[in-house]
Amino acid sequence: MRKVTINDIAKMAGVSKTTVSMVFNNKDENISRETREKILNIAKELNYIPNSIARSLATKKSYSIGIILPDITNPFFSEIARAIEDEANKLGYNVVLCNTDNKVKKEEEYVKLLISKLIDGIIFIAGGESKRSIDLIKNNNIPFVLVDRYIDGYEECYGVFCKNYDGVVEGVEYLLSKNKRNIVFVNGPKDLEISRQRFQGYKDTMMKYGLFKEKLVYESDFTLEGGKIVTQRIINELKDFDAIFYSNDVMAFGGIKVLLRNGFKIPEKISIMGFDNIQISQFIEPELTTIAQPIYDMGKRACSLLIDIINGEENIEKVYYFMPKLIIRSTT
Amino acid sequence: MRKVTINDIAKMAGVSKTTVSMVFNNKDENISRETREKILNIAKELNYIPNSIARSLATKKSYSIGIILPDITNPFFSEIARAIEDEANKLGYNVVLCNTDNKVKKEEEYVKLLISKLIDGIIFIAGGESKRSIDLIKNNNIPFVLVDRYIDGYEECYGVFCKNYDGVVEGVEYLLSKNKRNIVFVNGPKDLEISRQRFQGYKDTMMKYGLFKEKLVYESDFTLEGGKIVTQRIINELKDFDAIFYSNDVMAFGGIKVLLRNGFKIPEKISIMGFDNIQISQFIEPELTTIAQPIYDMGKRACSLLIDIINGEENIEKVYYFMPKLIIRSTT
DNA sequence: TGGTTTTATGAGAAAGGTTACTATAAATGA
DNA sequence: TCATTTATAGTAACCTTTCTCATAAAACCA
């Protein structure tokens, strides 16, 4: 049972395949109603599904975009991915998923793969100093959008980001206003620009009030497990601290767990602040106070921006900055 | 700056494109070392990336698989998707992501899309009575594997499932052993076969001890929000209940939250049991007692099974049943 | 040594399904 | 009747793979 092609339909309808193709592509202002309908009927009868691989080869467009991200299992990324996929689907594109585990090597391999598949564009959430991947994409003239993760030295790229610095400043100010003084900051991997930005927000604010101390700063890896481990270290090493600002929600979850297990009262004894506002942060108990990124909007915007670039729209805004905002819940 | 093709390389190397193609496909036992190396060098120099669309058209293989699931934002699915993607990548395939929100209409559209893209196979996590989609896939001879969600009347399909019935039985027995008697059961959408199976496990076990009561059974939709809502109803409507068995973890999270807010002590006053064992269930506080599905293994198996089918392997096991197991934590 | 058979190497062309450009025939209009 | 429009056909191109066939060199034999 061979697959039905445009040729079969042409033969059955007694017309050329050009005509059939035109009908399917709405370039049919010159086709008689009669012919058009005959073709459409035959197509439906045979359950014709166009071969978009062949179409892609001819048009050099695949109507697919790639999305490269560290780990779909991380709620922050799955929410972004969801937004991207929704928007892509709406605009007639589909999405190829690539998990990199923050490995630049994997990123590069995926980039090559995507290029070879004639992907129309890439949404890239970098896992590190991903310059080689970016260069590869650029050299092949593939439209791309960076999301969430800035890449140092590639400021001229299209991107959708969050004002990390301002978000953290707001968070720290809030903790201070609650009379917290020894605020621990759990940073993300420091080879990520977003980590540096978030940390800077913390440092500057603490400095401003003369409260900054090197020993209050910890680093972890944005994972649940990492949050647990670092929190255990904090408990062991620090005598007095009255708040922990985790630079993402996921680490905060791990941390809260360890703290509760160790008998710390939240928020009475110690306040917890997260960053991201992933969906579950309002479902755990106690609910997490956090700096909310508009995750869905960011993903959606990234996708529509990418498709604008693909379509060669004019006057595109190159970079979008979203403003995060403090959401006060029960951990502070 | 046109894209480099096999032709360019052939011309530069002074050979035919056949030769170049053979070199890249390791069908080169008949090519002299000299020629091979010349070709490889030129390719590297020009940063040649093969056009796999053209290759797909010629070979009728795309080395892509589609994964159709309700919502990537749901941790259960993102964990499965992650497993699938890992395995696919390992075997040289990539993955097209499709979120259906349990809408059969969306499923069908995606199926058509995937077929038109010459996808090599589909992993299908059904959102309902998805017979039309399945029929479409079958009629087009696309290899596919059902995961997690059984489809009534399609028992002969390839599939990777969990012994839902047995899992729930084990869970209920455990609750009973803890002297719980009024065990509420929160079922999933009843148009899903897995819901029916899980419910049956509950019903049979409760019946066995003469404890089954219609009013202890509730239905929700497997979402966090749904879990909250149904739990509020339970609190309002039932006077005495000493345990709630949620038929997935996500609903349990929503439920725990509502219960805690309403002053119920967990597990002292009421025990909570979930189903799935998604990653966060061990990170919330209190940690969730649940019936664990081997989620990663199931995804991995589904993918390798699919690729076996694609490769026409012989003697393939058609259906895999994974045995869930009780994991006792702090909510019971 | 000369001629024939193998073997190694690679050329050429078709096929895959579609689009896009050009050409042509028929119908229409002035 | 000629020019224009309308409707459709023909064909090249997209880039690979794959099959068949050709050629030159090497090996063989007497």
Image (cartoon, coloured by chain):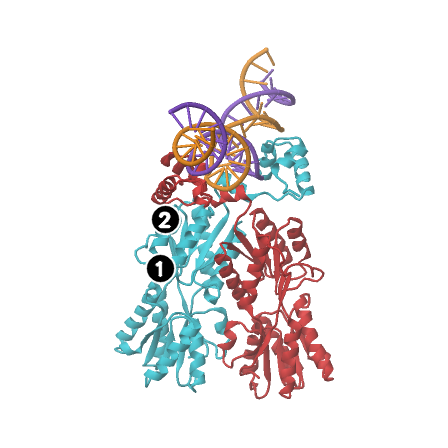
Chain colours: A cyan, B red, C purple, D orange
Left or right position of A290 against B316: left
x and y, in percent, of residue A204 in the image = 28, 71
Left or right position of A150 against A214: right
Q: Is residue A142 above or below residue C26?
A: below
The quadrant of the rendering that contains the N terminus of chain A is top right
Q: Is residue B32 above or below residue B221?
A: above
Tell me, yes or no, whether dots 1 and 2 are on the same chain: yes
Is disc 2 placed on a helix, strand or loop? helix
Q: Amino acid at mark 2?
A: Lys
Residue under label 1, please give it.
A150
What residue lies at 66% left-to-right and 30% top-to-bottom? A14
Query: Is residue A327 visible to the viewer in this orientation of the structure?
Result: no
Judge the density around disc 1: few (<14), some (14-19), many (≥20) Cα neighbours within 10 Å. many
Q: How many marks?
A: 2
Q: What is the distance, in whole Å, between disc 1 and disc 2 at their CAs?
A: 16 Å
Q: Quadrant of residue A71?
A: bottom left
Mark 1 and mark 2 lie on one chain; the one further toward the N terminus is 2
Q: Amino acid at mark 1?
A: Tyr
x and y, in percent, of residue B117 in the image = 55, 47
Left or right position of B101 against B35: right
Q: Chain of mark 1?
A: A
Residue under label 2, please give it.
A138
